[in-house]
């Protein structure tokens, strides 16, 4: 088989591949014949060993121009003029092909896949030979009329018996540009003829708001009367007003300027339920409407405080001495019973004095059990929110020094209780000096009674007083 035959067979194989892929991309409709123009420029290398070794050809440069006609989209019939140049140390070789072929360019959305093949007359110097090429590429559709993209191209030139070399084979990687006519605008559709006007109907009275009252008689023709129409003849066909927008119309709303909210008063339509004792339990659920539930509410009577007969803030259910005021105790058998301290008449009372060093604010160790009991009572009784630690002296000495000493002693007791774990914000301290004696300062016993520390419950007021 001669080299020309082999070359022809290779070209036919490439053409067969293109034709075989055509049915998968070709639509069964013909389009108008349109001209296109394709050109490419690129470079590559020589593949055949004879040309590389005998003629010293290594690289190549190619340029092509191919006018064509779109026969059936995506099939294009093309003319091809391609030039290939082969630089070498002894000069350069050249091959020019004049021929034609087919181009398959299915549209893939952003661009077109390109498969083409061409064959024709190849000129090298004064010699004419058979030459063909085949390409594979992708062109992005930058505009409907302009495509740009890369192409890999293979070309083969039949050998000449006079030079004793085999077929020349070479390839290139090129940039291809394709120009197409701008697409024609879609045909303009004539708007359909307007329908004939409907027959003129006899006018009838309207009811714009669909409330059953015709507009001539409706004082609110664009607002339905609704389920609660206004009873006033001057507002026939209007809804009754609802000033506070709570769903209860003003004609029955006992609180027309105040919305009833999520907890309405069952006794007064349109009004919010009250909380007479301000304990957070609405009146309709409060079984003790005039007595706050406090911090220890009765679990069986909503809104009522737990029973506490001796008013020492310890509910009877856990009070071991329910009829004697006491204070919290870790021992359940002594809880609520009188001991070192007791809660009574708005005070935390102590049955022993707090002892200090003479004329100082230093607390003596023998008062530690007493103050520890006061701290325990406070840390275990959340009902007591605020306590005033008071310091008092007798009338011996200068009043200003007595006032300062009483303040420092009250501050020392406050600091002791804070160390016991009582929150600082629950404690205040104030010295009164000799301004509030319990008894006359005429005897040493009286003066001893007046030198004292007191614990007054200020929040809530009167806690433990039975009021």
Image: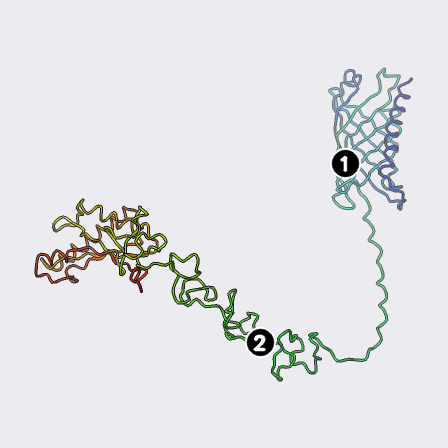
Q: Quadrant of residue 43?
A: top right
Distance between mark 2 and mark 1 Cα atoms: 74 Å
Q: Which residue is tagged 1?
A: 138
In screen coordinates, is 140 left or right of 99?
Answer: left
Determine crowd level at label 1: few under 14, some 14-19, many 20+ residues with C-alpha closer than 10 A: many
Position of residue 106 measured from the top left corner of the image (x, y, whole percent): 82, 39
How far from the left and from the top, in percent, is residue 112? 78, 39
| Frontmost residue, 252 versus 31 | 252
Label whose residue precedes the other's in the sequence (2 or 1)? 1
Q: Secondary structure at mark 2?
A: loop
Residue at the left extreme, as displayed: 443
Residue 443 x, y percent position in the rendering? 8, 59
Query: What residue is disc 2 on?
Result: 241
Residue at position x 69%, y 74% from top? Answer: 209
* Side (left or right) of 395 relative to 294: left
Q: What residue sits 62% from the left and 81% below the top? A: 235
On-image quarter of the C terminus:
bottom left
Quarter of the figure with residue 129 = top right
- The answer to whether 28 appears left or right of 209 in the picture is right
The residue at 76%/22% (across/down) is 91
How far across and how far down the image is residue 274, in percent?
45, 68
When asked about the image quadrant of residue 246, the answer is bottom right
**Element type at marker 1?**
strand
């Amino acid at each position: 088989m001669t080299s020309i035959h082999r070359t022809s067979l290779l070209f036919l194989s490439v053409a067969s591949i293109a034709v075989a892929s055509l049915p998968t991309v070709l639509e069964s409709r013909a389009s108008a014949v349109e001209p296109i123009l394709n050109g490419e420029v690129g470079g590559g290398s020589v593949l055949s060993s004879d040309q590389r070794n005998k003629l010293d050809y290594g690289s190549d440069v190619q340029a092509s121009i191919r006018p064509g006609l779109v026969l059936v989209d995506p099939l294009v019939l093309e003319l091809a003029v391609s030039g290939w140049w082969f630089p070498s140390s002894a000069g350069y070789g050249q091959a020019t092909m004049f021929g034609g072929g087919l181009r398959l360019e299915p549209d893939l959305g952003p661009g077109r896949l390109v498969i083409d093949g061409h064959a024709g007359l190849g000129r090298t110097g004064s010699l004419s030979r058979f030459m063909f090429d085949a390409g594979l590429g992708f062109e992005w559709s930058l505009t409907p009329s302009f495509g740009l993209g890369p192409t890999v191209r293979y070309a083969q030139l039949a050998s000449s018996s006079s030079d004793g070399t085999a077929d020349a084979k070479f390839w290139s990687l090129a940039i291809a540009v394709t120009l197409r006519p701008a697409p024609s605008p879609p045909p303009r559709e004539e708007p359909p003829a307007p329908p004939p006007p409907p027959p003129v109907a006899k006018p009838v009275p309207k009811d714009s708001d669909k409330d059953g009252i015709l507009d001539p008689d409706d004082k609110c023709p664009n607002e339905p009367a609704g389920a609660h129409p206004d009873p006033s003849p001057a507002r026939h066909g209007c809804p009754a007003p609802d000033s506070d927008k709570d769903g209860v119309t003003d004609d029955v709303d006992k609180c027309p300027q105040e919305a009833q909210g999520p907890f309405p008063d069952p006794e007064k339509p349109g009004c919010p339920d009250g909380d007479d004792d301000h304990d957070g339990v609405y009146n309709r659920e409060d079984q003790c409407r005039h007595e706050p539930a406090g911090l220890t509410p009765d679990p069986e009577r909503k809104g009522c405080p737990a029973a506490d007969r001796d008013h020492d803030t310890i509910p009877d259910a856990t009070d071991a001495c329910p009829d004697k005021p006491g204070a919290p105790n870790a021992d359940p058998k002594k809880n609520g019973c009188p001991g070192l301290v007791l809660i009574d008449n708005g005070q935390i009372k102590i049955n022993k004095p707090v002892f200090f060093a003479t004329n100082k604010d230093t607390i003596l160790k023998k008062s530690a059990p007493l103050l520890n009991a006061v701290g325990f009572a406070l840390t275990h009784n959340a009902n007591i929110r605020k306590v005033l630690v008071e310091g008092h002296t007798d009338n011996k000495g200068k009043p200003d020094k007595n006032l300062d000493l009483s303040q420092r002693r009250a501050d020392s007791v406050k600091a002791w209780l804070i160390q016991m774990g009582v929150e600082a914000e629950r404690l205040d301290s104030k010295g009164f000096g000799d301004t509030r004696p319990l008894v006359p300062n005429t005897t040493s016993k009286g003066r001893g009674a007046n030198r004292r520390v007191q614990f007054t419950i200020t929040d809530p007021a009167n806690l433990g007083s039975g009021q």
